[in-house]
Amino acid sequence: MTVTTPETGNLLYTEIEDDLRQSVRSLLDKRCGWTEVLARTESADLVDTSLWSTLAGELGCAAMPIPEEQGGAGGSWREAAVVAEELGRAVAPVPFLGSAGIATALLLELRLPDVLEQLASGESTAAVCIPFAATPYGGVPTSVTVESGRLQGQVAGVVDAGAADILLVPTADGLYLVSAESATITESVSLDMTRPVSDISFDGADGRRLADAGAELDAAVSTALRIGAMLLASEQLGLAERCLDLTVEYLATRRQFARLLGSYQALKHRLADLWVLITQARAVARYAAECATTGSADLPIAVALAQATCSEVAQQAAEECIQLHGGIGFTWEHPAHLYLKRAKADAIGLGTASAHRAELATLIDIQSPEVR
């Protein structure tokens, strides 16, 4: 096996990315505090459509990778990844991953500017009717059939479908665009109610075919899911960083036996180990975002590595956050449980860490005992 060193750009955050982060964080700090997020999980409206309207329409978060001539911001997936980090940090209940991530990537791959313009403006939100647990490696799930231009069938566990106006439905006959009003969308009870998933049923829904079935559509769906996995890794990075910050802040102020908890060497070691893991996760997440931006042939490897790493780091950071906060960390009156639920739910989104490690082993031609 020959190992080559990939050519990459600067993985450090640019000034534009730092400014974007500051703008998004400022908005989320004002309108998406953890108490507001918790209250929404117990309400009928799980998605904060008002916040999403501001993020998409005013800050342009839905338009980052879309070219300017198609109504977009003319940015890149690197900027989109920065937005994902901040949304993970706030466990924000908005449909960024499903609409500005997976759906946008699919439309970009298939070069469908008319629908992209709707998403870029923030006027419409889209969801791709593929189970959230699907991986980029298993082919296109096609549980929906088409008869005389009308769709029949069900798809379970679709992310961000509840907030969507447009449904992009892969079938054995091709990719169809369906109005969300033409389908029956039922929200599922999920561990993480800050990111609802839905079951969708089509009973003769009228659809417009956007692309024919074949190798091009299969490749486009696979790439879209990889882009989604890349953004999910960045989100998991932001979540892990926030958990570390919360824990450091708590240990630096909480006293026990007349000593600051942060002065205990064993706790310092645990936080230092977590910091190292998060630093490693940042490197692979940034590399995946860079590969997506440049269209690098290393994208499959970068995404598999990022997801295999960031998924487990996010879970560990959330678990450490709860444990090191002691009793308060186990209560409903502390945000730690929101981060743990998001980390656990994301761990099966777009492929488990084991699935990505198995794919990585295949991509770099080594034997792996793991199965998907």
Image (cartoon, rainbow, N blue to C red):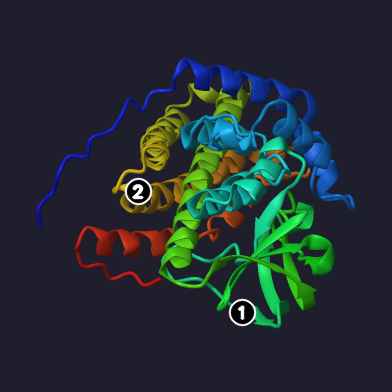
The residue lying at 41 percent from left, 42 percent from top is: 292
In-image side of 335 versus 365 (left or right): right
Report which quarter residue 281 is drawn in: top left
Residue 9, position as x, y percentages in the image: 31, 28
Report the residue marked by disc 2.
Answer: 299
Which structural element holds mark 2?
helix
Q: How crowded is mark 1: few (under 14 residues within 10 Å), some or many (20 or more)?
A: some
* Residue 314 seen in this snapshot: no
The residue lying at 48 percent from left, 26 percent from top is: 264
Which structural element holds mark 1?
loop
The residue lying at 70 percent from left, 77 percent from top is: 149
Residue 278, position as x, y percentages in the image: 43, 35
Is 179 above or below relative to 155? above
Considering the image in quadrants, where does the C terminus appear? bottom left
Q: Nearer the viewer, residue 29 or 365?
A: 365
Q: Which amino acid does label 1 sit on?
A: Ser
Q: How crowded is mark 2: few (under 14 residues within 10 Å), some or many (20 or more)?
A: many
Say the numbered circle drawn on residue 143: 1
Q: Nearer the viewer, residue 268 or 185?
A: 185
Q: Which of 35 and 204 is in front in this view?
A: 204
Report which quarter residue 141 is drawn in: bottom right
Residue lying at the far bottom in this picture: please name it.
147
Considering the image in quadrants, where does the N terminus appear? bottom left
Residue 367, position as x, y percentages in the image: 21, 67
